[in-house]
Amino acid sequence: MTEPAIIGVFEEGHRSAVIGLWTKCGLIRPWNDPHKDIDRCLSVPLSRLFILEQGTKVIGTVMTGYDGHRGAVYYLAVDPDAQKSGLGRQLMNHCEDYLTSLGCPKINLFVRSDSESVQAFYRTLGYEQETSAAYGKRLIPDT
């Protein structure tokens, strides 16, 4: 019998497993240092890095935060061996419940334009592509 997957909050001992999962899922980019992303998340009071564990193995993550206007979601990852089993939906529901408890009226998230399967996943959860253009400017280089 497979152990249940339990959602918890990131602790320092999870760091290498979380970054390993992000690497396995193709979420790491050269311009974003995952260690710095974790540290930044942990330094903001309303931000959370939730982990999904099965036994002692980290099989999922999601990073979320709220700035008083909108919630944001980053680093949603489910181990490829466990995808298509509802775990991504479970993590997103947890994020939505957390943000709703803070009074957050809306979530914004970014999906890479070439990630058609990820876009389809979010559509099944009721997310819609908006007409706003995303702009960015790096203020502090990670490399």
Image: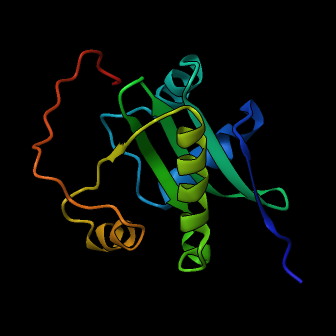
Q: Is residue 51 left or right of residue 119?
A: right
Q: Position of residue 93 (x, y in %)?
A: 57, 58
Please tell me whether residue 118 is drawn above or below residue 136 in the rendered image. below
| Image quarter in which the N terminus is found | bottom right
Quick check: can you spot residue 20?
no
Q: Residue at x 67, y 49 (%)?
A: 51
Of all residues, the one furthest to the bottom in this rendering is 1
From the viewer's perspective, is 109 left or right of 65?
left
Taking depth in this image into account, of 63 and 95 the one nearest to the observer is: 95
Q: Is residue 135 left or right of residue 25?
A: left
Residue displayed at 61% across by 52% down:
94
Residue 77 x, y percent position in the rendering: 52, 57
Determine the residue positioned at 48% across, 25% down: 36
Instruction: Write down the quadrant of residue 6 in the picture.
Output: bottom right
Q: Is residue 14 above or below residue 6?
A: above
| Residue 16 seen from this side | yes
Q: Residue furthest right?
A: 1
For image coordinates 29% across by 48% down, the residue present is 110
